[in-house]
Image (tube, rainbow, N blue to C red):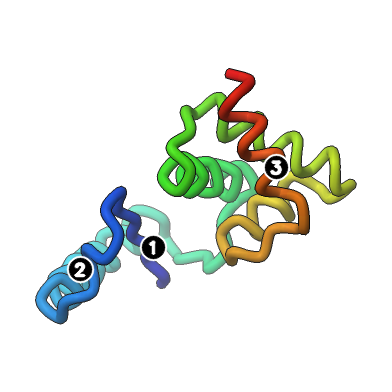
């Protein structure tokens, strides 16, 4: 099970105590998630991938929900890459060349 944690403040999770606390929470939650879901699927469903990508863009670039969605759509359209793949690229920090322009445009447009 993978847990991704984001903060609006850089460097919040660098100290050992924070990491240990987060690991403890993950260990405590995993059995409950497993019990609720029956089994843990390592992959996200496509809509969840988009939601995670929106959250990352919102946090990294100070975008609203609508701006983040618009940025994903513009990047997908301009690059000819499926929006679900763009969402995975956001999560892995491997966006196509020129994506930053579309993110900035989304912020200015909305």
Q: Nearer the viewer, residue 58 or 3?
A: 58
Q: Residue at left 48%, top 49%? A: 56
Q: Which mark is residue 47?
A: none
Cα distance, mark 2 to mark 3?
34 Å
Q: Quick one: SS at disc 1?
A: loop
Q: Nearer the viewer, residue 48 or 65?
A: 65
Quarter holding residue 105: top right
- Residue 48, percent across and down? 55, 46
- Vertical placement of 71 versus 27: above or below? above
Q: Which residue is mark 2?
A: 22
Q: Which residue is mark 3?
A: 101
Q: Quick one: SS at disc 3?
A: helix
| Extreme residue toward the left, this view | 17
Q: Residue at left 51%, top 45%? A: 57
Question: Mark 2 or mark 3: which comes first in sequence?
Answer: 2
Q: Quadrant of the C terminus?
A: top right
- Vertical placement of 107 versus 11: above or below? above
Disc 3 vs disc 1: which is toward the camera? 3
How many numbered marks, from 0 up?
Answer: 3
Q: Nearer the viewer, residue 49 or 12?
A: 12
| Extreme residue toward the top, this view | 110
Cα distance, mark 3 to mark 1?
26 Å
Q: Is residue 26 left or right of residue 16?
A: right
């Amino acid at each position: 099970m993978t847990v991704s944690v984001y903060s609006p403040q850089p460097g919040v999770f660098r100290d050992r105590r924070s990491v240990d606390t987060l690991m403890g929470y993950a260990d405590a939650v995993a059995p409950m998630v497993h019990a609720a879901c029956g089994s843990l699927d390592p992959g996200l469903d496509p809509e969840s991938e988009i939601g995670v990508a929106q959250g990352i863009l919102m946090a990294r670039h100070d975008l609203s929900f609508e701006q983040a969605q618009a940025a994903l759509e513009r990047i997908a359209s301009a690059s000819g890459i499926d929006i679900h793949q763009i969402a995975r690229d956001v999560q892995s920090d491997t966006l196509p060349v020129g994506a930053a322009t579309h993110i900035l445009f989304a912020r200015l447009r909305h």
